[in-house]
Image: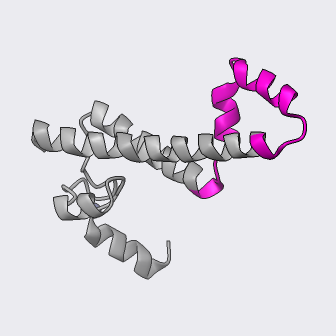
Amino acid sequence: MKKQELEFFRKRLLKMREDILTKAKKLKEDSYNLGTDGIQDMADAASNTYTADILMSISDNDLTNLKDIDGALDKMVKAAYGICEECEEKISEKRLEANPVARYCITCKRQMEQKGI
Ligand SMILES: [Zn+2]
């Protein structure tokens, strides 16, 4: 994959990551506003555990997405991004555009779905 293409997907992945974290942070803040023990919560927010705190308010679905995004970013570092984990062929850019965290090419993915994996 060309460097500028890689950069394009990297930015998309970072944006997706940021969106999830922003959403989680907002949820957390909303729960502060609703909470009756606001002082305690604010003390928590000021501590170093804030990030872990935010992560705890992320839904399971988003957490899975976050792991997928981190996995994809990790693969970029290892120059393995856009390569199918099953057959090691390139994943089409069209597929990556639709799903930047895709781990398998469409052929392998279809086969897996047929087998019910
Ligand atoms: Zn494949």
Whole-percent x and y of residue 8?
A: 20, 43
Whole-percent x and y of residue 51?
A: 63, 29
Left or right of residue 34: residue 104 = left
Question: Is residue 23 among what the camera can see?
Answer: yes
Q: Is residue 25 above or below residue 114?
A: above
Residue located 86% across and 27% down the image:
40
Whole-percent x and y of residue 111?
A: 35, 75
Residue located 34% across and 57% down the image:
102
38 in magenta: yes
Left or right of residue 18: residue 106 = left
Q: Residue furthest right?
A: 37
Left or right of residue 41: residue 18 = left
How many labels, in total? 0
| Of residues 107 and 6, the one drawn nearer to the viewer in this rendering | 6
Q: Quadrant of residue 105?
A: bottom left
79 in magenta: no
Q: Which residues are magenta?
A: 33-61
Q: Which color scheme did the rendering employ for the protein?
A: one colour
The prevailing secondary structure element of the residues shown in magenta is helix
Q: Quadrant of residue 13?
A: top left
| The N terminus lies in quadrant | top left
Left or right of residue 66: residue 2 = left
Residue located 29% across and 64% down the image:
98
Residue located 67% across and 31% down the image:
52
Whole-percent x and y of residue 58?
A: 64, 47
Question: Is residue 57 among what the camera can see?
Answer: no
Quadrant of the rendered image holding ligand 1: bottom left
| Of residues 15 and 103, the one drawn nearer to the viewer in this rendering | 15
